[in-house]
Image (cartoon, grey):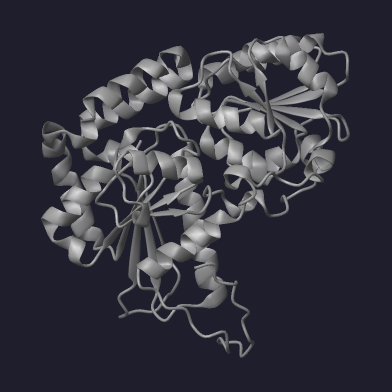
Amino acid sequence: MTHTSEFTNSNKTGVKPTVIALFFSDTGGGHRSAVEAVQTAIEQLCRERGTKRPVKVVIDNVAENTHPINRGFVQFYNYLLRHNQALMKYYYAFIEAVKPNDSEIAWLFTKPYLETKLRSIDPDLTVSVHPMCNQYLARCLKETGLKAQSKLVTIVTDPNGDFWSGWACKDSDLTIAPNDLSKKRLIDLGVGENQIKVVGMPVHPDFRNPPTSSKEEFRHNLGLTRDLPTICINAGWAGGGNMMEVYKALHSVSRPVQVIFLCGHNQELYATMKRESRRSPIPTAVLPFHDRLADVMAASDLMVTKAGGLTTFEAIARRLPMAIDTITEPMPQEMGTAQILVSEGLGQRVNKPSDIVAIAENMVLREEFAARPLPTNYQLDRVDAVFEIAETLLKMAGVEFLPAIAMDSGETVAARPSSI
C-alpha cells in the first residue's frame, strides 16, 4: 500500500513554501517511524519559533511506488520478516552482492516515477531515510537539474557498524549518522568525513513526552491489573520472530506477571495469539499494530523485541529495559545493535525461549530502571537527537526563524536553544 503525506505550517496564500521532501520505504516499520519523528520535530520547531516563509514537509514511501518490481522486493522483505527471519541474512547478502540501487537496469524503471515526483514536489531539500533510495535520488536530482536548488541529506537509522552499504552515498551533501560506529562504516565505504555529522537516532518526541494516560489507567483499559509487573512482547511492525515461543516459556515464571502482546501487521499471528491467550495462565492483552507505542512502553516494565534500530532506541528514550530476541540469528544490520544494547546494560539476550524465565524473575520495575543514568557510549544518551536533526534540515533548506519576539498574541516566544 502506498502512502503520501504532507504538512504545511502556515495558511498564508501566495507565498511559496520551503519544501522538505522525506523519502523512505516500508521495509519493516523503522524507516516510517524515523520519517514521522523528523516530521514531528520540524513541525514543533516551526510552531515554537515561527518561520519567515511557510515550511511544507512531504513524505513518500518512494521505493515501492517507483515500480512493481521494487514493490515486490519490499513485499518479499516483509514476508521474510513475518514468516522466516532465518533467511534474512541471505536476502541481505543478495542485496549487497547485486546492489540494485546502483543498477542501470533498475534505474531505467525507477526513473520515470522519481522524475515526476521530484518535479511535482520541487523540493528545497531532499532527504533519504532508506539505503535503497539514496543513489536513485542523487542521480535523479542531478539529471533533472533540481540539484541546483535542492541539497540531498541521508539519515542513517542503523546504529552500528554493520549496515547495508547502500547507506553510503557519496553524492549526498550530508549524511546524518547515529553514532561513531556508523560514521566509521560510512568512511570505510568511501563517504568523506566532512560529509558526515554524528547526531543520534531520530526517535519520535512522544517517547520523551509524558504518556497520554498513567500506566495504571492504560493497563486497566486493556483489562489487565493496574499494579502487576508487565512485560511487552513486541513482534514488530511485520509481526514476526520467535515471540510465541517466548510467550509460552513465560508460563514457567513463578513471579506474578502480565503481558501486552503486540502482533504488528500480522493478522494470522493476532488470531493465533488470541486463542493462545485464552488458554494461558498469564493475564494477556493481545493487540494488533498499535500506533501509540510510546504509551505501551510507558505501561510496561520489560520489552521483548528484536534488535531493530528505531524500536530499541525508542525503548531507550522511554527508559524501558529490553530482552533481545536472538533465538534466530539477527539480521547483519541488527546484530551490532544487539551487541551494543547488551554491552551497555540496556538489554539481555534471549538465545533460547527459556532464557526469558530468569530475565522475568529478576526484572526491575521501569521506574527503578529509569532512575539510572543512560550510558554515553555510542550516543545512547542522545534521546532528543531528532530536534538537532530537524534543525539541521531546516537550516540546509534555507529556513529562517523569526526573532524571539512578539508573535500574533504579542507574547515573547522562547526559542529552543540551537545545537547547530
Name the residue: 35% across, 73% down.
Answer: 398
Seen in the picture, residue 370 relative to 390 is either above or below; the reply is above
Q: Judge whether 79 appears above or below 395 on screen.
A: above
Task: Give the image location of residue 120, x and y in percent.
Answer: 21, 59
Image coords of residue 116 (percent x, y): 17, 52
Q: Could you tell me which residue is drawn at 19 percent across and 36 percent down?
A: 102
For the N terminus, give its image quadrant: top left
Q: Is residue 7 left or right of residue 222?
A: left
Residue 262 visible in the displayed image? no
- Can residue 376 be seen here? The reply is yes
* Circle count: 0
Coordinates of residue 301 in the picture (x, y in percent): 78, 33
Instruction: Classify residue 298 as left or right of residue 123.
Output: right
Residue at x 45% of width, y 41% of height: 182
* Vertical arrangement, residue 393 with respect to residue 190, above or below: below
> Is residue 327 shown left or right of residue 167?
right
Pick the residue in front: 152 or 73: 152
Percent across and percent down for residue 193 are 36, 52
Residue nearest the viewer, comparing 290 with 343: 343
Quadrant of residue 18 in the image? bottom left
Splitting the image into 4 quarters, where does residue 248 fall? top right
At x 41% / y 33%, what residue is drawn? 163
